Image (cartoon, helix red, strand yellow):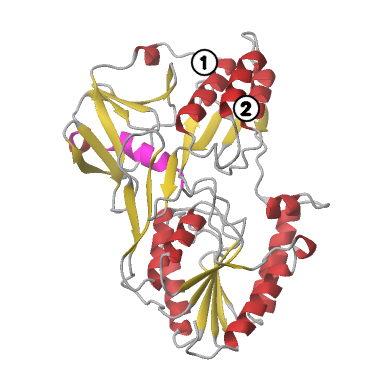
Amino acid sequence: MILSLLLAGLLQTDPTSILPPEGVFRSRGYDWVIDRGPDGVKLYQEAGPACWPNPDGSVVDSLVRAVDLAAGVVGLSEAGDDQATVYAFDALSSLPEACLSPATGDRDAVLAVADLMDARYPAFEPRGVDFTIRRSALADALAKGADADQAFAAAEALLAGLDDPHVELVADIGGVERTLAVSEGQTLDAVKARPGERPERAWLASWRAGVEQTILGGRGHVAANNRLFWGVRDNVGYLAVVTMGAFDAEDDMATEPLDIALEEALAAFAGTRAVIVDVSNNRGGYDSISRRIAGRFADRPRPAYLKRGWGSGTAYQAVEVRPSERTRYLGPVWLLTSDITVSAGETFSQLMRTLPNVVHAGTRTRGAFSDQTPVRLSNGWRFAMPMEIYVDPQGRALEGRGLEPTERLSLYPPSDLDHGHARAVSGLIRRLAARRPDRP
């Protein structure tokens, strides 16, 4: 989930309702500084010794609420969601000196990326990257007179091979957009390497045809802006969710189309031998949506994971799965994941794994749980990175590692990218249909 909406709301909120009318506040983690003065509110981004104004810090709606933390600490979170991330801010006596005279060169921007990654990136060790060596080499690659092309090349070398879908860098250099190339995982990398125009679109068409025809036999349903596919085959329910959001083409966060579709699906699933919940082609979205869907399968509240800003020094924030007040399915559930399952698709998977009626099958998820924090660099380049650590209830770190299923099922075999998914799921349906009703 991206934090820009929260930042926008934070700046637009009536200052008397959340923070004192005037003052300077620094976040614990995330490296934000807020300056509230007679002329309004300004947001600054810090990175090591650097500080600069964030030009993206203004939008229309108020989205934040105050959270009672501790004396002298201001807590802010998303309104209407008591499990949304809480951000802690300490009061400062004045705006940091560096914020008053920001350096705006391309070299300065890349050095800021290095400082942000060094201070806030949560997953160097599990991703096998020695960032200390890379950061040391950056000084040699970035001469003081480095131009934009050289600076971008240095940034590419700094971030190469992280295999983290939440790390992004986009630059406009001479009117040409340059984008950092990041792996999307073995399956999607293989899809995109195929010949022809727009190979991923062709693959998605094959995936959808496999779901509708092979898995559901032409008797399934497509709903919520083509984000949900569901049906019943051989007394086994099937539900595929491809994003955690965008269920309405006009409103990315609308939940009504989702709720309507789930009501219909879960009513049809009543009395089935089992239900397959397939997020093996889920590209992420909003954690609040993940919790909303997982609640449809929960018998009672259960702790799912803990999170906090990396290097923030704040206490972990606990997140639990809570039973929905709407129709639920509490019979046997098989959760399917793959290396495409990412971000909010992974938080959903972790929520589901805490439920006793769920078996997790498929292959390991991407390991990109953290919210994606956007940073507009001082030279105008757009950067984003994860700044949080997630752990399971037993304290095992999830960021950079992903979730390993208890039963392996190859859903996207390299030898059959177009049809392997449909064949594997159809095989699982046959297997579940043949089981005795009293078996899990």
Where is 426 relative to 284, above or below?
A: below
Using the image as rendered, state which of residue 405 and residue 331 is in the foreground: 405
Kindly identify which residue carries mark 2: 158
Taking the magenta stretch, the answer to whether it contains residue 2 is yes
Taking the magenta stretch, the answer to whether it contains residue 354 is no
Using the image as rendered, state which of residue 96 and residue 361 is in the foreground: 361
Kindly identify which residue carries mark 1: 104
Looking at numbered disc 1 in the image, what kind of residue is underneath it? Thr
* Residue appearing at x 66%, y 50% in the figure: 185
Answer few, some or many: residues within 10 Å of disc 2's Cα (few below 14, many 20 plus, some between 14 and 19). Answer: many
Q: Which image quadrant is residue 388 in?
A: top left
* Residue appearing at x 60%, y 32% in the figure: 170
Q: Which image quadrant is residue 303 in?
A: bottom left
Q: Are marks 1 and 2 in contact (CB under 8 Å)?
A: no
Where is 115 relative to 170, above or below?
A: above
Left or right position of 433 against 213: left
Left or right position of 83 against 436: left
Query: Taking the image as drawn, is residue 318 in sight?
Result: yes
* Residue appearing at x 25%, y 39% in the figure: 75
The percent coordinates of residue 423 (x first, y second) are 71, 74
The percent coordinates of residue 136 (x first, y second) are 59, 19
Q: Which residues are magenta?
A: 1-16
